[in-house]
Amino acid sequence: MDIRYPHPSVFYSGKLRSKRKRCALALGMTLMGVSPIVANAAGRVEVLVDTKAARAMEGWIGITIRNVGDAAVPIMTLDTPFSRTDGRLPGNTLHVVDETGHEVAYRGGWDYFGRVTLDSFTKIHPGEQWRVEINVARDYKLDVGRTYRVKYVLKLDREPDADMVSAEERSSFTRAEQSAAFSNEVVIKPTRIDL
């Protein structure tokens, strides 16, 4: 289908003299030019932290990551709480502070799988949502009866190491437009800690 747009001088010639015809044509051309921009919006990741976990009083929280955009977003697996299945974190991925505003010490493990390759990433597709429950008390030094504020920042600016992937693989990797996704902050006050 070959679409030909009239030259702007047509607006002033005798062919499109009526104001109604000029306005209709201008509106049509504008809408046709704007619609592809809206259709090609990038993926956008949202992160939600909640205390709906069944054992919230023991220091558990829920983390939900969802893609509310219309493009897949690559996420480095070790930057998420989804890389392990035991309710623990792969590293110091949460921001936990006590009631005085001091950062709480991380005492969990550090997963390390070597250099960053394409296999280090997974994609969250449009409309997809992931949820996991994490025992904050297991990885951070929490005390019974104290109040803590917890939030999560998902880094989205990671890329494979340039010397670990071919030029062709690197060109196929599309980094997210967001550099990070910031969660809300929740307050937890463990009444019992079960490690």
Image (cartoon, grey):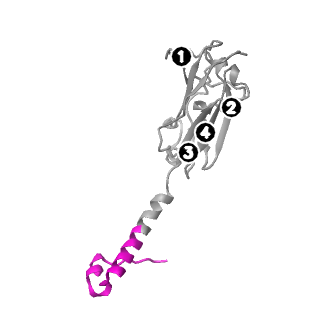
Q: Can you identify the residue that label 1 sits on?
A: 99
Q: Residue at x 52, y 47 (%)?
A: 168
Figure quadrant of residue 169: top right
Question: Is the residue 151 above or below the residue 178 in the image?
Answer: above
Q: Residue at x 53, y 16 (%)?
A: 99
Give the percent coordinates (x, y) of residue 147: 59, 17
- Left or right of 11? Residue 187 is right
Question: Is the residue 153 above or below the residue 41 in the image?
Answer: above
Q: Residue furthest bottom?
A: 14
Tell me which label, 1 or 4, sits earlier in the chain.
Answer: 4
Q: Are marks 4 and 2 in contact (CB under 8 Å)?
A: no
The part of the chain drawn in magenta is 1-30
- Determine the secondary structure under disc 1: loop
Q: Can you identify the residue that label 4 sits on?
A: 65
* Amino acid type, label 3: Val
- Determine the secondary structure under disc 4: strand
Q: Nearer the viewer, mark 4 or mark 3?
A: 4
Tell me which label, 4 or 3, sits earlier in the chain.
Answer: 4
Give 41 or 76, whichever is nearer the viewer: 41
Q: Nearer the viewer, mark 2 or mark 3?
A: 2
Graded by Cα atoms within 10 Å as few (under 14), some (14 to 19) or many (20 or more), the crowding at tag 3 reads many
Q: Can you identify the residue that label 2 sits on?
A: 52
Q: Can you identify the residue that label 3 sits on?
A: 73
